[in-house]
Amino acid sequence: MKKKLLICFSLCMAVLFASGTLMAQNSNEKTETEERRQKSDLEQEKKAREWVSSLELDNDAKEARLEEVIATHLKTIRDWHNEHPYTTVPAGINPLDGKPLSELDRQIIANSAIPGSVHENLMSGLRKDLEEEQVVSILDKYTIGKVEFTMGGYHAIVPDLTKEEEEKIRGYMEEAREIAVDFKNMDQISGIFEIYKTKSEQYLNSRGRNWRELYKAFVKKVQEEKAKKKEEK
């Protein structure tokens, strides 16, 4: 009997020890998660503060409201992304080209399902206190100036780009910029711009230009210039 009691006691102690260890691990993981979130929150708030500061508004009330709007948006996008990984989108094919969806494709799809109110809250919050040019400045901060950078590329590849063509393509890039602010990182932002770059290239083709040949000629020119500089050295 004593032996049986000793075995039961030992088993109970083992279970209690295991439960205590598991609870401690869960508590540590929870603490680490909270610490990471707090650190990320501070990073988003710092980013919002720097973006608003760049506008030099000299109005504390406006700056506080704008920082809150931007930081809230950044945190919301982060949380949606983290809570909706690419695995929530079934693997399949892109119906436009029949190719398998990449991990990035699936993540963009998952992130694009965020409620439209998130974007509306950002834009209405910005426009409440800013002129449109200032709103654009904030969107450019988020997308690291990809509109002007991409337009520079089009001018380099198509030197005789007409005013009409430039306005059309710029419109596509500005649309891409506004959509891209609802995505978490630069890979996803670049993915959104790629959609509108494809539209721009299709537009140029529809106007009798051959985008493939234009790009090929541009690459050849760049390579020749590099070779020439190398020879001169």
Image (cartoon, rainbow, N blue to C red):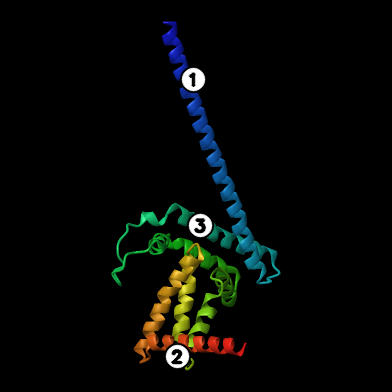
Q: Regarding mark 3 in the picture, which secondary structure is present there?
A: helix
- Percent position (x, y) of residue 74? 54, 60
Q: Are marks 2 and 3 in contact (CB under 8 Å)?
A: no
What residue did someone put label 3 on? Answer: 78
Q: Residues within 10 Å of mark 2 (few under 14, many from 20)?
A: few
- Residue drawn where x is 54% and y is 87% of the image: 227
Could you tell whether 148 is left or right of 105 in the image? right
Q: Nearer the viewer, mark 3 or mark 1?
A: 1
Image height of 155 relative to 146, above or below? below
Q: Amino acid at mark 1?
A: Met
What residue did someone put label 1 on? Answer: 13
Image height of 101 relative to 136, above or below? above
Q: Residue furthest top?
A: 1
- Residue drawn where x is 39% and y is 64% of the image: 105
Q: Residues within 10 Å of mark 3 (few under 14, many from 20)?
A: many
Q: Regarding mark 1 in the picture, which secondary structure is present there?
A: helix
What residue did someone put label 2 on? Answer: 164
